[in-house]
Amino acid sequence: MEALNHPSSEDLSSYALQALDPNEAQSVAEHLLTCQECRQQLKAYSAVADGLLFAVPPKTPPAQLRSSLEARIAAGRPVAAPPRRGFRFSIFQAALGAAVVVLLAVTAYLAYQVNDLKQQQQALLQLLQQNQTSLALISQLGVSVIPLQTNQVAGNIVISPDGQNGVLFVHGLSPLDPNHTYQVWLIPASGSPQSAGVFQVPQNQSTSYLSIRSPVPIQDFSNIGITVEPSGGSQAPTTEPILLDNI
Amino acid sequence: LAEITDEELVKRVVQKDEKAFLALYDRYASQVYSLTLHVLRDEQLAEEATQDTFFKCWSRARSFFTERGAFAHWLLTIARNTALDRLRLDKRRPALSGEQDPEEIWELLPEEGSESDEARWRALYFILQSLPDDNRVAIEMAYYQGMSHSEIANTLGWPIGTVKTRIRLGMDQIRQQWLKEEAPEPKSKPSLPSV
């Protein structure tokens, strides 16, 4: 009965050729572990199978196969620093450098534009605020309107009933360069002029205005004046007033 | 390097001696190429398989152990498996050996002392060609095409039992003729017809 469990010669010969289906091969392999007789029989078939490795007439491969193999092996070696490629390499570097410079310039220009737009936005917001304040002020009942007049410049100052808020409207001023600004001064009968704020005259606009807040009633000052000062304003007037009138 | 044994050359290849490696290539390129060509039936694919075989030899020479068998046997087993894998890839058949580690080749080789040697094996070429066609075809499809019983049966339209019988008969015939032809150690190895 035991012999019935041995793999057949067909299975052993095919096993030696690795031609059995996987489940059959597994079964034969397990049997071989414990059966010396079958291992001996397989040994003969395996010797034949191994011989088949050599049972093919030799044929010389193409010559370039050897050089291709050498190149493949060489590709696996540590690579030495590549030789400089002279002019061609320099052109590439120059082109790359130029591209980087152009990219940086464009980036800087765009950053400048963004910053400029932010400043414009901020200025517009301040202007809008002033507009709203001025509109609210002149809409109040009991406001005072004091006309101002010099040879070249005219205007009005609208003062709230409590006297501590006002809006100055000026006509006839020219736009200044970015390094200068107009500065408004409230001048007491005695003592130093006090700054009421600075303003610019936008291009293509004939009227400028400035919201003024004062801790004391504006009417308590004797005069109002406008001078041209360095950008940001001054602690005290540094130029002759282009407008000076009584309040 | 012509006088140096395969085993000594392999030791040098382990040390990344390219000259030793190329000496082995010069010795065995024809056999590897012919075997892969016989399996793949395409010169371009055979060249690629030959190159892959020798590259595995170069990169995994450390896994060759002299005491476990002949270098030629180890190398040609790698060549056969490499070619069969490529064949199965092209035919979209499941791979038999996959990315087989050269160390695993040992499990496919005969036990040490099997009394096989390259010279005797070469005689098998003539014996194989003398087999009845059905027996020879079944053996060649199994060994050189890597086909299982089922695949051979489907391809030839034979019952599986017939496939098994043809293989067994062919293997027995080879063995018997081989034993009959076996003679005392030949002075010169039989030469094969060049192709």
Image: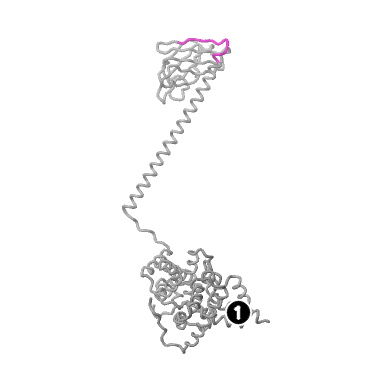
Inspect this view and state whether residue B44 appears: yes
Rendered image quadrant of residue A229: top left
Residue B154 picture location, percent across and down: 54, 69
Residue A204 picture location, percent across and down: 41, 20
Name the colour scheme: one colour
Lateral position of residue B165 relative to residue B17, left or right: right
Q: Is residue B142 above or below residue A209?
A: below
Residue B130 picture location, percent across and down: 46, 81
Residue A139 lies in the magenta-colored region = yes
Chain under callout 1: A
Q: Which three-letter amino acid code belongs to the residue tagged 1?
A: Ser
Give whichever of A92, A133 is nearer the camera.
Answer: A92
Residue A109 lies in the magenta-colored region = no
Give whichever of A23, A80 is nearer the camera.
Answer: A23
Q: Is residue B112 above or below residue B146?
A: below
Picture quarter with the N terminus of chain A: bottom right
Secondary structure found at label 1: loop
Q: Which residue bears the numbered disc 1?
A: A8
Q: Is residue A154 above or below residue B22?
A: above
Q: Name, please, the residue furthest toward the bottom.
A: B184
The residue that appears at 51% across and 25% down in the rendered structure is A125
Give the magenta range: A137-148
Rendered image quadrant of residue B23: bottom left
Q: Circle 1: is it few (<14), some (14-19), or many (20+) Cα within 10 Å?
A: some
The residue that appears at 49% across and 28% down in the rendered structure is A121
